[in-house]
Image: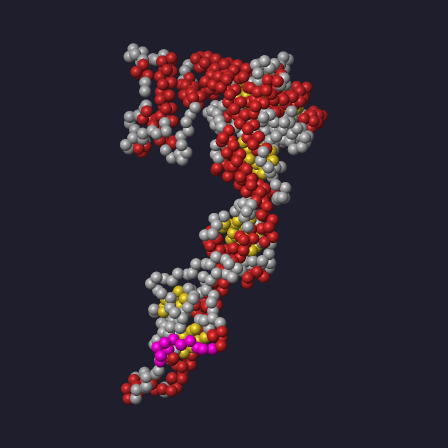
Amino acid sequence: MVQTADIVSDSAAQTPTPGVAMTSLLMEGASALEVMTSVNGDPGPDGAAGRLPAHLPDEGIAGQQLWTAVKELTLADAEEEIPCLSTVQQQTAVAHTCAAYATMLEAGAQRQLLDQLTSDVTSWLAQLFRQPGMSLFVPSPNCDSLVAMVRMRLHARYSSYAAVGYEALYARPPVVYVSAACRPAAVTALMTSLGLPGGAVRQVPLSAAFGLAHAMDVAQLQRMMDEDESAQKVPLLVMAHAGTPDLGHVDNLRRVTELCRERGVWCHVTGPSLAALALAASRQPPMELTLGDSLSLELGAWLEVPCLAAVTLFRGPLAGQPAGLPPPAPTLLQVMPLWTALLSLGRRGVVERIHSALALAAAIECRVTAVPKLQLLSARPGKEVAPVADIDKLLSQSVNFTVVLESLSPVVVFRYNNDAVDDMAYLDNLNSWLGQIMQRDLPEVPIQLLDVAGSGFCLRFSPLTEPCRPLEDDVLDEWAECLGQQIEILNATVHHRARFAELTAAGQLRAVPLLNWAGLGAVRYIPTHLQPLMEAGVTDSGKEDINKLNTELLTKLKSTDSAFSLGDGEDGMVCIRFGMVTMDTDVDELCSLLLDLGGQIEESSRFLETMSEMLMKGIEEANQDLRKESEDQLWQEGVLRHVPLVGTIVNWWSPSPKPAVRGRRLDLAEGVLQTTEETYKSHVQVRRSSSATAGTQHSRTSSSASASGGAPAPPTPARPEEPPAAPGIATPAAAPAAAALAGCGELTAAEASAGCRSVRRCGVSVTAAAAAAAAPEA
């Protein structure tokens, strides 16, 4: 790195010449840019934290160490890779540094440099875009091109506007005409910046000729001007589009320009199609290419140099007309990067960039038109779009360049449209899904999603407004193939959607409407006992049961297919969403799968509820038997044996015989509370023989597969340290009445009613498949 002190001699070190200082500055800026754009920069042993002090150091840092610290500070956490800058982008970035240096020169030197740069840029742009005699204006964040042109016209038409301001507008209010396709933000900025009332801006309707069009209706514009002139208003300015913001349609610029010149109204033209003016052959007559009184050129987007400012070319006042107040002159910080970029590219570089963008848009448009079910919205009504190979032929043969502007489209807007779908909201969801998939699968082709008034969500490709590198034919063919595959998926989803609606119209599967879902649809499984209550309204506990059942159902479905997902309906309840499907998808089979798995979960829940009821009933019966046995024992033994102190003497004098062990056990298979006398006699569990038990046995378990062939649910695993007890194992005695089933008095009726799958009480397990309980004889 070369510093100023290394170049300048000691005698002239204190007052270096501007040329030497500029040379050193250029070398320093190039070195800094190289450090900032290096992909694999060495952060050093201490990293960025070691180079960036917590406080302002006493001794400053400079050179490569400073620029490396700035790079780490700004780009250390960036997820994307550092982009490689082109030559013109690098030179334009360094030009900003030079422009900042030029602002520190003397006032006379600044003025001389600014005049020279402004003259060069104005002359180059006027020749490049075939607009002779134009002046240059560079908009700023506080004053865009439309606001500057309206302010200039206000000063020109109202001589006292500079002195009295808005009071000069009372007698004859001004009117600005904008197309209905204009973005509302531009109108709002205009009224806010100039303090104009809402009536000062009128929207001109769009033309209805040749079907759907987004171009200004010139006949309606003329009618509105006549009305305003009759009402003592002043038609001030008309903003026309050479490429509307959404669809890229071109207004009838020739007729609009002629009408404005007849009425003395300023015509301001904006849009990406103005870039095609640079493609005009040198032999084209310049006056034929004069379009409007001012042109807004987005050079930063057209030339892929984001740090370039937009410019506006405007003509000066004609002979005999008031000059008004011209827009503010550009500054060095605005003009020098423009001057550098244009000089770096040259005329051929600018033309090649614009020609490549137009050819790429034409190639994308040809591939879009070849895919069925895609509606092309950017096509000119009644105009044939020129193929890629015919662009040069069209430019060489056309005498009137407005024909070229109407034929060459730098914007491609298309939308999926299927006559089988009459729901516009669902079509918007499908197009939104299509745009997101294309952005994810092939990001090399930048696709934007936008909401077009009257059409809904659309996909937009605009290489002049979005950065896009040159694409080869194989990449475009791959993009077209991917687009065709996604359209087939959309067609299949729309085709199966009707059958899906029939299967979910009634019954246990109920369709759930979703606002922002492009898949097949959404359903909710309704248990059998809640179906009659769906019309009248389900209670909160019923809603909770439905949510739990559908959540468990989704868990099982995800193990089968990942196309299912959990969603929330408009009523706040859980639903199961079906994703996109292909043409060979069997919707009936999918719905049958849901019914089978839902039935298994529902049956498992019913089994647990039945078992809970049996446990509660067994506990109550056991408690009643124990109370009765306790009372009988009290009368048999006598009251004296139970009186304190006295009972001890009586028992010592005449001990009571040892009672036989009698317990209770609950047979879950039959739901019957039985005694354990036979068990203690033979030390073997004996099942009661009866016609009911010999005929049928309970076989419902939580893991049984449904009869319709659904996938079996996985059985509930037992705890490793607690093996489930076998049905009918009794628990020996010595427990109070409340321990009739558990053996130690800790199993309550609430626990049993909750349907717990495994409850451990003093070494005894009560499970959903088999539970054992017994009570001692008191």
Q: Is residue 166 above or below residue 492?
A: above
Query: The magenta stretch spans which residues?
Result: 679-690
- Nearest the eye: 662 or 717: 717
Q: Position of residue 333 (x, y in %)?
A: 45, 20
Scheme by which the image is coloured: secondary structure
- Nearest the eye: 456 or 555: 555
Answer yes or no: is residue 149 visible.
no
Whether residue 550 appears in magenta in the rendering, the answer is no
Q: Position of residue 540 (x, y in %)?
A: 52, 59
Left or right, residue 400 beside residue 687: right
Q: Residue at 54% of width from left, 55% of height from top?
A: 592
The quarter of the picture where the N terminus appears is: top left
Left or right, residue 448 beside residue 201: left
Q: Residue at 49% of width from left, 26% of height from top?
A: 470
Quarter of the image where one finds residue 532: bottom right
Q: Position of residue 226 (x, y in %)?
A: 71, 25
Left or right, residue 25 beside residue 196: left
Q: Is residue 432 above or below residue 593?
A: above
- Nearest the eye: 88 or 5: 88
